[in-house]
Every structure is written in C-alpha cells, then in structure tokens.
Amino acid sequence: MTKFLNDLSFGKKYENLLASYLTPFYTSINKIEGKFKDYDIICDDNIKYECKCDRLSIKTGNLAIEFKCNNKESGITSTKADYYAYFIIKSPDEYDLYIIPTEDIRTKINNKEFKRIVKGGDGWRSEMYLFSLSIFENYKK
C-alpha cells in the first residue's frame, strides 16, 4: 500500500504542476479529485487534460502509453481527455513537459508508429504502446 500512496502523491505533484502551467492560458482550471478515469483536469470551454509522468523515459528514450489494464480498456482507449500532458522526469526537480493532443496519439497508434506493445505497471497488469520519445518532440513545451 505504501508504494501506491507514494505513486499517488507523486502523480498529484505533477497534476498541480500542470495546473500551474495552464493558469496563464485559461480562466478556469479544475482538478478532478478522487477516482475518475476520464481525465484529470478540465478547463474553459470543456478542454480536458490527462496528466502522466514517466521516470523511465529519460533513461530509455521511450514513452509508454497504456491502453489496457486487467484486460479492460484503459488509458488512451478510454480517456475523454483532449490532451495528454506528459512529464518526463529528469531528476526530482527537473522535467520536460509534452502536451500532446489525444487524437494525435491515436493517429500514431492507428498508423502503427509505436515500436511494440509491452506489459508493465503494478503486477504487470497493464498493456502499453511503446513509442520512441523522439516522435513527440514537436509537442515539448
């Protein structure tokens, strides 16, 4: 349970950073609290963001995007978010932020631009598309 709580705290930190980043662009920013898989933040005009952070991407040069967990659709296949905000963690105080339109990710999946499908997450219950981080370079903020 401690790992889950640590991961939850870690994720909340980056949701707060995303909200701070978005503040100059919107008049209303609302973080969704509790268990809600559709998106993490909703802003003006119903613009929705999914917030992700990855500690391995900086080492591997890859970006993993979940599409299934426990044999059920999840992540990119079930999100209602308009954008994926991806924090690539370099160190505890340094990161790169990518803001990628969800439809662009889905197009890359449909065009089979991913390297392969991998398993991961807690207990290896998640399935993810593994992309080269470099194909998202144009989305880096």
Image: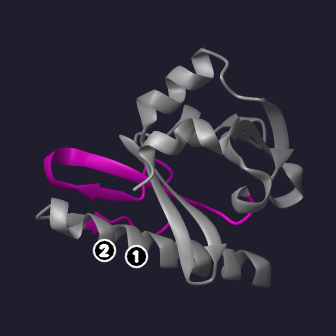
Query: Is the C terminus in the top left, top right, bottom left or bottom right quadrant?
Result: bottom left
Residue 67 sits in quarter = top right
**Residue span colored magenta:** 30-56
| Secondary structure state at the residue bearing disc 1 | helix
Q: Residues within 10 Å of mark 1 (few under 14, many from 20)?
A: some
The location of residue 104, given as percent across then percent down, is 45, 29
Quadrant, the N terminus: bottom right
Residue 25: percent from the left, percent from the top?
A: 17, 60
The reply to whether the magenta stretch includes residue 35 is: yes
The answer to whether residue 32 is left or right of residue 75 is left
The x, y position of residue 46, in whole percent, is 21, 46
Q: Which mark is residue 16?
A: 1
The numbered disc on residue 20 is: 2
Residue 102 horizontal/vertical position (percent)? 44, 36
Counting other residues with Cα less than 10 Å from the Cα at mark 2, is it few (<14), some (14-19), or many (20 or more)? Answer: few
Q: Residue at x 38, y 67 (%)?
A: 18
Task: Find out whether the residues at labels 2 and 1 contact each other: C-beta distance under 8 Å.
Answer: yes
